[in-house]
């Protein structure tokens, strides 16, 4: 039985004062799911100071493909590890589209995260045009395959996968639970046997989160699906009450 995991993606939101209130709110009540927040880099120290010793994890939203060196503006995985990060998002669609991250870049970032003991949350998802063209499985399958090829089976067994249809992110349009379940089942099937073949055991244990306009009122239905193991939450992770409600859904 895979434990439910709910991760907040704060994106480029927050301030020291707002984060303090949000984190205090999240800490104040227990949640049935395992919780974590992915904060902007400057706030990782605040997350570490506030959340250390609690059951709530924290992480970053991106990581460099490089480990050190002359890469102005980049942040390396060992640096994230120093701030106690458990997780790092890799391949979020906003990184893929605004920063030109390729499947190969995303796979390298996942590898760097693992090498520093972090859990990469590998994001995959199709655009509306791709869905309408019937390409959803081909797109997410290709995105997954790049990561599978870059990692050993042992490493693959340590990642978290997140299916985030691009058309559902920040739009208020959620995939129906059936649409999401179908893609999650496809991804798990690919892991077990398809072109991205890993092993049945890794596939069965892999947490696959759904992201894209998850709110307190739709989380329970999404999370009730057999291959949906929790959520990657953007907008609704910025309100403690909503985030906790999703963590309890
Ligand atoms: P959203 O964002 O919940 O605001 O749609 C999800 C994400 O981009 O991770």
Image (cartoon, rainbow, N blue to C red):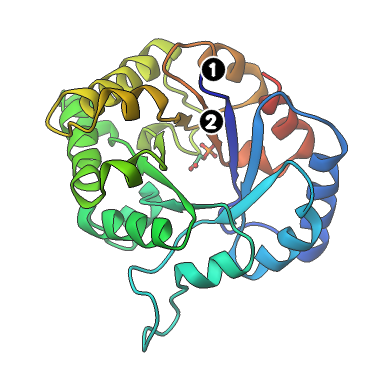
- Identified at 79% across, 32% down, the residue is 241
Residue drawn 70% across and 58% down?
A: 14
Q: Position of residue 173 (x, y in %)?
A: 47, 26
Q: Report the residue at 39% width, 10% height from top.
A: 178
Secondary structure found at label 1: helix
Q: In the rendering, at what x and y percent does residue 221 appear?
A: 55, 11
Secondary structure state at the residue bearing disc 2: strand
Pointer 2 and pointer 1: residues touching (CB < 8 Å)?
yes
Label at residue 231 = 2
Q: Residues within 10 Å of mark 2 (few under 14, many from 20)?
A: many
The quadrant in which residue 121 appears is top left
Q: Position of residue 28 (x, y in %)?
A: 87, 38
Distance (Cα) linking label 2 and label 1: 8 Å
Q: Does mark 2 have its CB less than 8 Å from ligand 1?
A: no
Residue 185, x across and y down, in percent: 31, 17
Q: Which residue is mark 1?
A: 223
């Amino acid at each position: 039985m895979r434990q439910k995991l709910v991760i907040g993606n704060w994106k480029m939101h927050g301030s020291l004062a707002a984060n303090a209130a949000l984190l205090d709110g999240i800490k104040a009540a227990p949640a049935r799911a395992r919780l974590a927040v992915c904060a902007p880099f400057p706030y990782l120290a605040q997350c570490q100071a506030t959340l250390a010793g609690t059951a709530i994890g924290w992480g970053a939203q991106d990581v460099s493909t490089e480990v050190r060196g002359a890469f102005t503006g980049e942040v390396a995985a060992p640096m994230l590890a120093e701030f106690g990060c458990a997780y790092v998002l890799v391949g979020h669609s906003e990184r893929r589209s605004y920063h030109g991250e390729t499947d190969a870049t995303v796979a390298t970032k996942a590898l760097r995260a693992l090498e520093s003991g972090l859990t990469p949350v590998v994001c995959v998802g199709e655009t509306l045009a791709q869905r309408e063209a019937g390409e959803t499985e081909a797109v997410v399958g290709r995105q997954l395959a790049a990561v599978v090829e870059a990692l050993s089976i042992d490493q693959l067994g340590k990642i978290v996968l997140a299916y985030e249809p691009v058309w559902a992110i920040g739009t208020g349009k959620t995939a129906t639970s059936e649409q999401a379940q179908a893609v999650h089942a496809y991804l798990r099937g690919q892991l077990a046997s398809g072109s991205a073949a890993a092993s049945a055991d890794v596939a069965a244990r892999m947490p696959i989160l759904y992201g894209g306009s998850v709110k307190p009122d739709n989380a329970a239905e999404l999370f009730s699906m057999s291959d949906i193991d929790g959520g990657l939450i953007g907008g609704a992770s910025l309100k403690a009450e909503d985030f906790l409600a999703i963590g309890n859904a």
